[in-house]
Image (cartoon, helix red, strand yellow):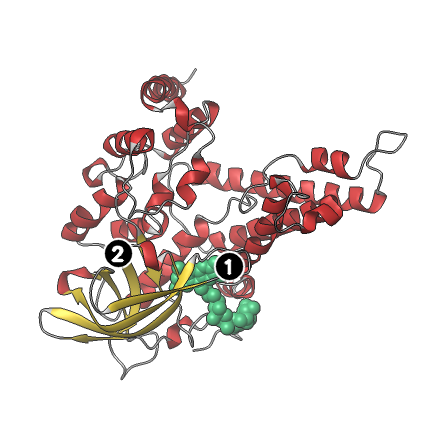
Amino acid sequence: MSEANAKLEQFRGEARAWLAANFPRSLVGKAAVYMTYDLDVPMEGDALAWRTALGEKGWGTPTWPTEYGGGGLSQMEARVLQEEMHAIGAFNPIPILAGMGVTMVGPTVLEYGTEDQKQRHLPPIARGEVRWCLGYSEPNAGSDLASLATKAVDKGDYWEINGQKIWTSGADISQWCGALVRTDVNVGKRDGISFLMFPMDQPGVRTRPIKLIAGASPFCETFFDNARADKKDLLGKLNDGWSVGKRLLQHERQSQTGGAPMGGGGGSLQELAKKYVGLDSAGKLRDEDLRLRLAQHLMDAKTHSLTLARVAAESRGNAKVTAAASILKNSATHVAQARAELTLEIMGGNGLGWEGESFNDEEINAVRAWLSGKAMSIYGGSFEIQNNIISKNILGLPETTQKG
Ligand SMILES: Cc1cc2nc3c(=O)[nH]c(=O)nc-3n(C[C@H](O)[C@H](O)[C@H](O)COP(=O)(O)OP(=O)(O)OC[C@H]3O[C@@H](n4cnc5c(N)ncnc54)[C@H](O)[C@@H]3O)c2cc1C
């Protein structure tokens, strides 16, 4: 065994021992509880003990530097930690509790933040104590994000913010917001944008939740009426928010490359098909057409996961995100949405249940997952916008639709 592998195996032993001592067995299978955890409700019992232990160890943000509350682990060690968690049914709730903090704001603050911003903002995210939301989209600025109109005016010792955002995920339960705002109206639209960070709990900020077809209200309209951001919470340079914001979006897309089904239904599609559709006398799935499409989907899913593994291996511990995240995001979206479609088709009439005793939990969850999965090709930049980025930044094709 090479020295590097021996070190990694030693780390595996340490991780296993630490998890055995700290992960409360009562939480096995309870990861979903955190998906809807409201930070206004005080966390208690084993859930609190686990969040605290992970936060103190820094293993909720395993690759972040230790001086900012992270675990200081290499990418390989972080993967080993994940494997060991998986093996005992443990999970990391901190990226969920922190909203956009761990996957998007944190990595961007690490790259662009001042030392003071890193010291103030990163440790509370790493402990899962502060939830962040992201104010990018506006009623007239979605794909054409550079048209955003929410304005911030320099008031001497603070920024005064006026305008409206929309589709702000978790805005009603977040403590902090990272937003793109217009700080100069007299220059090209991409040149007058800045990235500001400010607390949500202030008189100038109001949120109105938007209810979705799948039943939940995951996002809000967010209104700023003389809201304030501290001068020290400008992230990156003044009027350079377009670069900062684009970098954050790469982190967002990177975090959406898993291809996992949305909202449950993670079991085997083959087993589901055997149960609902049945087998013919030769032991094959009874519906030949479905069988072919199922096989195609399983190949696509395998190809996607192997590509992800290859990208991870090639990055060799250097976790820098690139425009390639757009390829993986679209591929993940394709896999997850195809899976959700097939699940409903396999379930037939039972896959149309919304509520009531004639449908079991799996069937009801499958409909919700299918509906909420539609959002995957929209958030983080739509499917078509990722294709534009791929054509321009990866394939080097001429700019056509992205002029602005
Ligand atoms: C579940 C969910 C969560 C979200 N969370 C957040 C959040 O937390 N913060 C936030 O700021 N935003 C969030 N969004 C908003 C999201 O980023 C936008 O919805 C997205 O960028 C698309 O913008 P739009 O809705 O205005 O659609 P539009 O930009 O109006 O697009 C409509 C359609 O036109 C297509 N289109 C537009 N321009 C082009 C073009 N140049 N070339 C080809 N096709 C084009 C699009 O692909 C799309 O199909 C969220 C969205 C969803 C669904």
**Residue positioned most to the bottom:** 186
- Report the amino acid beneath label 1: Ile
Neighbourhood count class around disc 1 (C-alpha, 10 Å): few under 14, some 14–19, many 20 upward: some
- Looking at the image, residue 278 sits to the left or right of residue 371; the answer is right
Q: Residue at x 76, y 38 (%)?
A: 276
For the residue carrying disc 2, how many other residues have a C-alpha within 10 Å: few (<14), some (14-19), or many (20+)?
many
213, above or below 92, in the image = below
Left or right: 106 in relation to 279:
left
Q: Earlier in the sequence, mark 2 or mark 1?
A: 2
The image quadrant that residue 220 belongs to is bottom left
Task: Confirm or reject: label 2 Cβ below 8 Å from ligand 1.
Answer: no
The foreground one among 162 and 221 is: 221
SS type, badge 2: strand
Q: Which quadrant would residue 17 be assigned to in this image?
A: top left
Q: In the rendered image, which residue does mark 2 sit on? A: 176
Q: Which residue is depicted at the point 45% across and 22% down?
A: 88
> Mark 1 highlights which residue?
394
- Closer to the camera in the image, 11 or 156: 156
Name the secondary structure under disc 1.
helix
Question: Can residue 306 be seen in the rendering of this structure?
Answer: yes
2 or 1: mark nearer the eye: 2
Mark 2–mark 1 distance (CA, rounded to whole Å): 34 Å
Task: Name the residue type under label 2.
Answer: Trp
Distance from mark 1 CB to nearest ligand 1 atom below 8 Å: no
Q: Is residue 398 visible?
A: no
Quadrant of the snapshot with the N terminus? top left
Depth check: give the residue in front, 96 or 389.
Answer: 96
**Residue 166's x, y, as percent?**
40, 68
